Image (tube, rainbow, N blue to C red):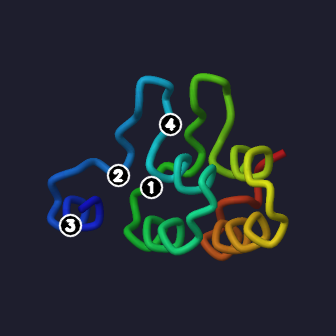
Amino acid sequence: HVRFLLENGEFDVNVQTGGGSTALILSCKGGHVNFVEWLLGLGGVDAAHMDQKGLTATVRCCITIPRVQTVQNVIEELLVAGICEGEQ
């Protein structure tokens, strides 16, 4: 359903939850590698956005996903998109 809305231009990819999370942050936090890749392919995703706690999608991924392989896969997608290069 989310893909349908995004692909049909009826949804802002950078819309935020009450806590300031975006679709990218939630996807990274949940370890949804395919959705992260798909979102990044849409263009216009604000990967530098920070939630209300000051955490980006990259940081959320690293601190919330228990499986190392999933973290590596998500970070790889972010690196391919040029997202992680400037983060500290």
Residue located beneath label 2 in the image: 13
Image x and y of residue 17, in percent: 41, 31
For marks 2 and 3, give the CA distance: 12 Å
> Disc 3 to disc 1, how far (Cα)?
17 Å
Question: SS of the residue at dot 1?
Answer: loop
Instruction: Give the camera-side residue of 46 and 19.
Output: 19
Give the Cα separation between the discs numbered 3 and 4: 20 Å
Q: What is the C-alpha distance between the residues marked 2 and 4?
A: 11 Å
Tell how many labels: 4
**Coordinates of residue 43 in the picture (x, y in percent):** 40, 65
Structural crowding at the residue carrying mark 4, measured as other residues with C-alpha within 10 Å and reported as few (<14), some (14–19) or many (≥20)? many
Element marked by disc 3: helix
Pointer 4: what residue?
21
**Which residue is denoted by mark 1 in the rendering?**
45
Mark 3: few/some/many CA within 10 Å (<14, 14-19, 20+): few
Mark 2 residue crowding within 10 angstroms, few (<14) / some (14–19) / many (20+): many
Nearest to the eye among marks 2 and 3: give it: 3
- The amino acid type, in three-letter code, at marker 3 is Phe
- Which mark identifies residue 4? 3
Query: Relative to the observer, which residue lies in front, 50 or 86?
Result: 50
* Badge 3 or badge 4: first in the primary sequence: 3
